[in-house]
Amino acid sequence: MKKILFWCLLLTTTISTSLSAQNEAAATKFGDAIVKSYFDNNCRFVFQQLHTSIISIEGGQSIPISSEMEALFCEDSPLRTDIAVSYELYQQNYTPQVLNAAQVEKEYPMWASHLKLQKGDFLYLGGRPNTAGIRLFKASDMARFLLRQVDGKWKIVAI
């Protein structure tokens, strides 16, 4: 009986770990697609990935999103305009990091306190250049967002 219980527990842990890794990979892929859309000048794609209400990562304010806000949102690119930028340069100079909810709570407790984190959330940190990298964003927080699955689709729930 103890062996059966042990194997059931081991199987459950293995499945849970596998699903978590799959979700992290999917969140990373989604975050990468958001960043790539900046370089493709596809602001509409980014805007369509915003949840109906966005939380400010640093301040905690909640901002309702409406279709009328798209023009304002797309008015200004997060990319530097004083140098030539490309997604290839981004890939060469940046290494995005993806943190799960537990890691966010540990590394950024002040943010976690107002982000209303849920199991399955991931913080995509894509705006930090490698040590000797070229800075392509106007500010490092331009490629930082909290991702969550909403109705089976990834959405940006905080920026």
Image (cartoon, rainbow, N blue to C red):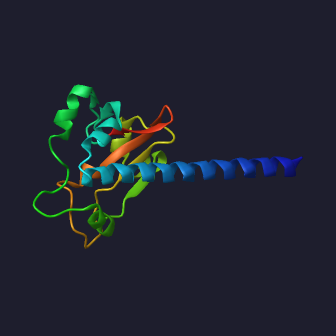
Instruction: Let me know if residue 69 appears in the view.
Output: yes
* Viewer-closest of 59 and 152: 152
Quadrant including the C terminus: top left
Residue at (31%, 34%) from the top-left corner? 55
As drawn, 89 above or below 59: below
Residue at (12%, 57%) from the top-left corner? 81
Residue at (15%, 57%) from the top-left corner? 80
Give the image quarter of residue 156.
top left
- Left or right: 104 as drawn, with respect to 18: left
* Viewer-closest of 23 and 39: 39
Instruction: Let me know if residue 159 appears in the view.
Output: no
Give the percent coordinates (x, y) of residue 73. Answer: 20, 37
Q: Residue furthest bottom?
A: 132
Residue at (28%, 71%) from the top-left corner? 131
- Left or right: 66 as drawn, with respect to 12: left
Give the percent coordinates (x, y) of residue 63. Answer: 26, 29
* Viewer-closest of 94 and 55: 94
Give the percent coordinates (x, y) of residue 93. Answer: 29, 68
